[in-house]
Amino acid sequence: MSIIHQYTLRDCQQKKLYLLLIALLFSFHALFSQQDTLNPKRLKTILTIESLGYVGIMTGLNSIWYDSHLTWDFNTINDNDNFEQMDKVGHSVTAYYVGLVGYEALKWSGVERKKAIWYGGSLGSIFLSSIEIFDGFSPDYGCSWGDVAANTLGTGLFIAQQLGWDEQRILLKYSYHKTHYVKLRPNLFGTNLIENATLDYNGQTYWASVNVASFLKESAAFPKWLNVAVGYGAEGMVERGKYNVNNPEIRRYRQYYLSLDVDLTKIKTKSAFLNTFFGVFGFVKFPLPTIEFNQGGVTKFHGFYF
């Protein structure tokens, strides 16, 4: 197996795990109801689940990705030029959401607010940075300090908002549309929709979705579920690294977006199924009219962008 194909396969497995983890966490997130007093039984349950889950995932990753070929030599890599930093933004989004659910799990157990924020909110950075430590001791990969920084940024965004506002007024979100680049490089971007959505950075967009109503007075008429979203993406990335060395005719460029969004977590119904459904898909940007400003100086309007 070539090193490029090995990295691609490993990235695919990794990002599938991240998306599955986020979806599972959001399904639990929708069921959490906060408790004001400490419930030792609930806390014990949460700590047991987190501990067994952490050990199980780390053990599984060692078997799947590293195949017991870890060494005592710690290696680092600088992959900050890869994919116009789209992978780094993905790390931040994952760390953010794991921290959000970690916090709500502790609040569900009745843990004091600030302890829940710091301990639960740090869960994403701890989990993802543990993978970087594994990478550092693997001769095939190497620890990426850029990934560690991105993990920390996502965790910091959650913790800062929860400490300052006691709520998340700026949500990080994700959307994807399939691009023609997957046909050019199926070994890099996958051969099915799930692999495309996790590996094809050309079709991914990451969003900061701002809940406007939370910055206004309670009496304001602005809809509490309607957000304004700013997005970031990039296209033309058919190779790793900063440049398309073997495909110089394909130009890389960054994309910036402005759109409206729907905060599904603000929509409460009497249906447990709908509340859970909205919770599971709360990290997905709602497809709405969008304006694109790209690095080539071109402005585009999309009727519905996803």
Image: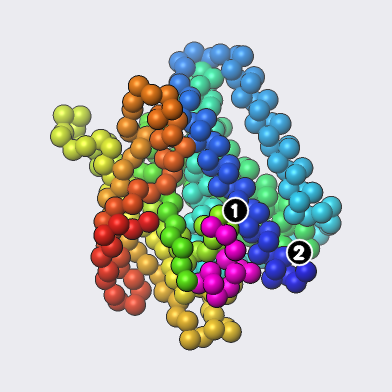
Quarter in which the C terminus is drawn: bottom left
Residue 94 placement (x, y as % from top left): 53, 47
Query: In the picture shown, does residue 278 fall above or below 33?
Result: below
Q: Identify the amino acid type marked 2.
A: Asp
Give the residues in magenta. Answer: 181-193
Quarter in which the N terminus is drawn: bottom right
| Residue that appears at 66% across and 28% down | 49
Residue 23 placement (x, y as % from top left): 53, 40
Q: Earlier in the sequence, mark 2 or mark 1?
A: 1
Residue pointed to by mark 2: 140
226 on left or right of 117: left
Query: In the picture shown, does residue 135 fall above or below 242?
Result: above
User: What is the CA distance from the residue labelled 2 to the residue labelled 1?
Assistant: 18 Å
| Residue that appears at 34% across and 64% down | 256
In the image, which disc is placed on residue 15? 1
| Residue that appears at 41% across and 74% down | 253
Magenta stretch: helix, strand or loop mostly? helix
Find out whether residue 73 is within the magenta segment. no
219 on left or right of 120: left
Residue 104 placement (x, y as % from top left): 49, 28
Q: Does residue 7 show up?
A: yes
Within-10-Å neighbours for mark 2: few <14, some 14–19, many 20+: some
Q: Count of labels shown?
A: 2
Label 2 with label 1: CB-CB less than 8 Å: no
Using the image as rendered, state which of residue 201 and residue 181 is in the foreground: 181
